[in-house]
Image (cartoon, rainbow, N blue to C red):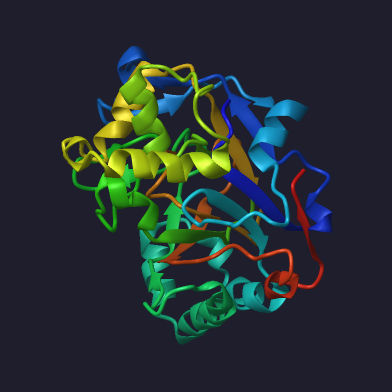
Amino acid sequence: MLESIKVISFEKTSSLSSPRFWLSPGTVSVEQLDSSYTHYSPDAFLPVEQWRILNSVEQELLCRVSQSDCLDISKYIGIVSLPDYVLEPFEALGVSLAVSDRDCQLLSREAAYQQAVRQLVNWLLPLSVAKQELIIHNINVNPPGLVTVTYDRVSNHYIGLHLDSWDGLPLEKRHLSTNRICVNLGLEERYLLFVNLTLIDMFHFLSVGSLDNTSILGFQERQTELRQLYRSSPSLLQSIPATSIRARFLQLFSDYPVIKVRISPGEAYIAPTENMIHDGCTLGKNFADVVLTIRGYLRLPTFRDNQVIGGDNQITSR
């Protein structure tokens, strides 16, 4: 595992006792799997289902952050705990008990639900770094027991590990895309799956045909160096659609690990999902997975403004 995308936990002390991260040894194309995966798109990739807890070296690579680091939203993931006053209106409405799209539609029409979302947005506003309004997605329900959760309603297939493309920015501008917060409003833990490399990382490794990064600077400098390197060759960048990099990388580097991150009820992740391969996971759950997504330019809380995310939270890079 290389050092690139980082995860910072801004979490309640009560959540520190359970493992936060697991690692899979790589990915596999559904074409290599048996007929039980026909509900997946033919070009989908899934993590190899051989998970283990990260060792100390891997956890250091994933979580090592100093207080002087600039938390560039294009290459950092934050895990935050929502305060009780934000969660309680959703709980009073019984949002965690939703099991279908119909339930979500009915809830979204409730005035109390709309007020609960406004209160969540108000809590988020101190983290918004742009003038654009936050984009609120519909509440969503996923069944339990899914290796990955994202479903394409046009093709009627699950798409597996993927790259979001709401903003549709080209490769050289992907780091300028919006990020998103995804809130777990369900009854149980859910999981974020991701490959801890940015899109420009993957493009570079595909270009050189190797994951050997001995000639590249450390992770903080590498993104800037690569952007400058490939900005000088715009025709090369423009010849490769950003979304095609996912399949090419996972085909060539199928042994590159996938990270699984626990997101407990009442927690959320803030992540640059247009700049990294990712998906959700509901394996091991007994109840439906209920999530609410909001997009924007959301910075991570800093070491100085912990009060933004709730007084009993603490910042950890464990």
Residue 75, horizontal then vertical, whole percent = 51, 48
Query: Is residue 21 found left or right of 312 in the rendered image?
Result: left
Quick check: 216 above or below 208? below
Q: Is residue 51 left or right of residue 316?
A: left
Return the x and y of residue 253 as percentages of the image width and height: 41, 19
Taking depth in this image into account, of 98 and 7 the one nearest to the observer is: 7
| Picture coordinates of residue 62, whole percent (x, y) | 64, 38
Report the side of 222 relative to 240 (left or right).
Answer: right
Viewer-nearest residue: 180 or 238: 238
Seen in the image, is 216 located left or right of residue 84?
left
The quadrant holding residue 37 is: top left
- Where is 224 relative to 54, above or below? below
Residue visible at 59% across and 33% down in the picture: 3
Q: Which quadrant, please, contains the N terminus?
A: top right
Quarter of the picture containing the C terminus is top right
Q: Position of residue 312 (x, y in %)?
A: 82, 68
Q: Name the residue rendered at 16%, 39% in the picture.
A: 235
Residue drawn 67% across and 65% down?
302
Q: Is residue 263 visible?
A: no
Q: Is residue 66 visible?
A: yes
Camera-nearest residue between 180 and 209 = 209
> How many numbered badges does the structure rendering display?
0
